[in-house]
Every structure is written in C-alpha cells, then in structure tokens.
Amino acid sequence: MMKNCKKSIGIITLFSILTTVSCGNAFMENELYNLPGIFLDNASMPLDINTSFSLSGALKWLKENSVDNTTYRIQIAENASIDPQYMSEFKGKNINIILSASDKINPVIRLATNASKALFHVDCSTLTLDGAIILQGANGPNQESLIEVYNTGILRMKAKAKIQDSITGAVHVTQGGVFELIGGSIENCSSVNGGAVSVSDSGKFSMQGGIIQHNTAMARYVTTQSDLNYGINGEEGALPDCFGGGGVFIGKGGIMEMSGGEISQNVASPNGGGVLLVGLEGGEAPVFLMTGGIITKNTVQRLGTGDTSGGGVALGINSVFTMQGGTISFNNGADYGGGLAVHNGSFIFEAGSINNNISHKYGGGVYITQGASNNNTGSASFLMSGGDISENKSTNGGGFYIGGEGDEIVDTVSIQNVSITNNIASAGGGAYFLIPDSALAPQYDLSGISIDHNIATSGGGIQAEFQGSTASLSLKLENTKITANLASQSGGGIYSTKYQYLLYDEAKINCASGIDDIILNNLCTANSAKANFGEDNDV
C-alpha cells in the first residue's frame, strides 16, 4: 500500500498525534498517539520546533518550513485566537492545510481581538475544514469576510465543520478562487450582500452538501465608489434594488453550482431571501446552476415603503439561472416572486420543483419581468422544458406571472412539457400574462403542458391582462391540457380582459390589436366559473 504513495505528509498535532499518510487527498489512519508533537512522514520522534503546541505555533512553523505540494493535518484540541493568516506567505506553495478536531472537543477558532482582516486568506493553496471545528466571527466590525478565497485558492468544508457569527459574511470567493461546501454548516452570519457566501469576478462556489441557515443580508444606502465597482447598481446616496441574498450573493462574473445541501431560513432585505444574482450591463454574467438540493423557508423583508422580490431566489440584470433539479419551496415575504423573481435576467427551468411558495402581489411560484431599473436596461427570458410549479399562492399569478414594465415586454417565453397545478390566486390561478401597451407583440408558446386544479377569482387556469389600446399577444397553445380549474367569477379555464371568450380545439382567432390565439389539439374541459360570458365555463 505504501509503495503507491507519491507525496509525503506533515502531521502537526496539538495534544494528540494522529499519524497519517496521504495518497492524493485520501488519508489512512495508522495509529493515535497521546504524545503531543509535530511529525513528518513516519518519523518516530517529533520535530523540535522550539514553540509551544498551539494553533498559532503550528501555523507559524508551516509558514517557515512547509514544503511545496504537501498536505498537512493540524489536529486541534483546544480553543484558539489567531492573527490573520495569508497562505501565500507560507514557504510551501500549493499546499493543503487540513484543520481537524474530534466532535468530543469542538474547538472554537477566532480572530485575535485587535485583528480587522479575514481569519484566513486562502490563495495559491488549499484550506480544508474537516471535523468538528468552529470558526467564529469577530466580535467587532471587520473589513473582510471571515474567509477570503482568491487567486486559485481552494476552501473545502466537510461534515461537522461550522462557520458562525460573522457580521461581514462568512466566505467571499473571487478572482479564480473556489469554495467547495461538501458538508457542515454556515450559520448566523450577516452582510449587505450574501449573509453567508458572496461570489464574484470568476470566483466559484460549489455546494454539494451541508446547510446554509439563519443568515441575513440587509440593504443600506450606497455610500462609496467601491460599492459601484463591486457590481452594485445605483448612485451614491441612493438605495439600489439589488442588495440582498440572505444565504448567497452572486455578483458579476461569479459562478454557483448547487448539487446538494440546503439553503434555508435565511432573511434578506429587500431581495433574494436564499440567493441573489446581480450582474452589470455589458459585464460578465453571474451564473447559477442548480441540479439538486433545496432552497426553502427563506424570507425577504421590506425596507421602508419599497417592494421585496424573490423569497427563495432573485435574479437581477444580466444574470442566468438554470434549474435542472432540486426544489425551491416554502419561501415567503416577497411582493414579487415567492419562489423566484427574475428582473431582466434569464431563467431556464429543465427539471425540479417550485412549490408551496407565497408572494403578496405577483407570481407565487415565479415572477418574470422586463423593464428599466436604475438606468440599466436588459432583457428577460423564461424557458421551461420540464419540472413542475405547484401549490403556490399570490394575488396575481399563483403559479407564475409574466409581465413588462412601461412599454417593455418579456419577449422570450417558451413553456413545454411541464405541470402547473394546484396554485391559487385572485387572478390567474395557474398563470398570469400582463401585456403592456407596446407596438411589439410577443409570441408565447405553451406546448405539451398540463394546467390543472388551479383556483382563482378570474382565470382559473390562465389570465391575460392587456394595458392600452395597442397591447397584443400571440399565444400558442399546442397539445396542452387545461382541466379542472376553478374561477369564482370569470374564465374557469382561460380569461382575457380584452375579449369575452377564447376558442380552442383546433381553432384560431386573429385580432389585429389584441390576442392572436393559436390553439391546436388541446383539451380544455371540466373547468368551472360563474357564467359572466355565457354558458361556456371553460373560458
């Protein structure tokens, strides 16, 4: 077994010595010693490092003596306060330092009382939190997040490790840095953007497990040019609409991939209770790919008289969210988008579930809009080819809401092979389309979908709202089932504010200034409403 190992390992043990050998990143435990000391390879005697066995002493020794491309494990057995650590200053390059502890000890590591920088600056090397270690935030104001990851540095966090109580965020990833959350938790941290994690400028956050919970992101007024440089839209002295991300903030050029774990019970004001993405016009887009995991029970709070958006996830200008799995559920507090709000961004929904979310005004499950914001313009798109939107609630658009601002329209909408079911709203139980007074008529394609068992006052399945004399829409429904929806007043299946009824079943209505309805091979039956427009309860 030993002959296949290519790298040696240094073992630094505080109060107990764990002799290990490394093959790549794997460790094989040989023997647990009671004698404290620092061991390299399989040496039988500890090195004489002329320092007491403390975390500070161990890190000092590594700074002066570490060897390139070597993994070191520090087994911690007591609480420690340390000065800020810059891994680029360590003698060994491309090293991996593993901080580990027994869950019978749970040592707490915190900054020295006079420090105002990050606890760890992870650059050019790797820091792994493995075992029941707690990294504690500073007691007073700090200029940086608790851990800064950049310049190809890698932070790995595994089961039982915890980061908590940092008032400037837990982890900031930027400039090619990578944060891999494999297990453990980040709790009770706060910041302006990204209470737990913030990612920007080619930084990457990979969430494979663990939990991000009980963190907060609260808005403030833009006060410095650095706010603007960081990707915050607005002018100095103004309150921008992009602050938030109670759990995670993804700024310009940042990347997040979520395949597991949970983002839950975080709070933001005013956007993105769980996750917020905001880019810059013409800049590199922030990107979020979700293939698994759950974003749940997050909340957004109102700041003054302003609106709130994205109880679970919020997308700002020039941002992209692709959902290929996982669940967004039980998020609340938003005026716009109980589960997800998209403002001038792109949402690609291929698989997964958006369910049991609540918004006060628009889009219980999903809210999509396009329009000017803080003098920035952009385009919005909604491409849905799988998954379900179910059991959400709102005033307008229980399942989803698509609408423009002013004369802007959401001009790219395609919804295929999905289920919109058991949603509730006053208008548009399943879906709500708001068409502003615009010269350009969008075409929205809905094919192979099921809109069923939704409830509203008007438009149990779908409601189309037209503003102004020139508002128009080309709505194509193909191989679609609109069944068993209920409206207490008008349009159990489909309700349009511009026309008394819509035909279906291989019929077409062409209205020059209104709705261009192409409805092919559909089933629109068993919907129920009070017959305001005759006896046809399906429309």
Image (cartoon, helix red, strand yellow):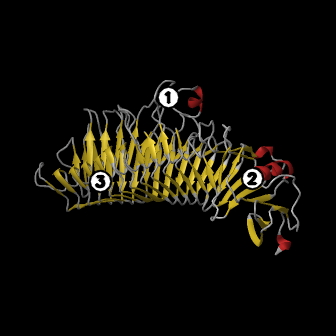
Q: Which mark is residue 430?
A: 3
**Residues at marks 3 and 2 touching, judged by CB atoms closer than 8 Å:** no
Q: Pointer 1: what residue?
A: 234
Foreground mark, 3 or 2?
Answer: 2
Residue 181, given in percent of the width and then of the height, sits at 60, 56
Q: Pointer 2: what residue?
A: 55
Residue 77, given in percent of the width and then of the height, sits at 70, 60
Residue 366, given in percent of the width and then of the height, sits at 38, 49
Residue 290 appearing in the image: yes
Please report the residue visible at 39 percent of the width from the left and 52 percent of the height from the top. 331
Q: Tell me which numbered mark, 3 or 1, is placed earlier along the sequence.
A: 1
Foreground mark, 3 or 1?
Answer: 1
User: As shown in the figure, which amino acid type bears the numbered disc 1?
Assistant: Gly
Around disc 1, counting alpha carbons within 10 Å, would you say few (fewer than 14), some (14 to 19), or many (20 or more)?
A: some
In 3D space, how far apart are the residues under numbered discs 3 and 2 (Cα atoms)? 58 Å
Q: Which mark is residue 213?
A: none
Label 2: element kind: helix
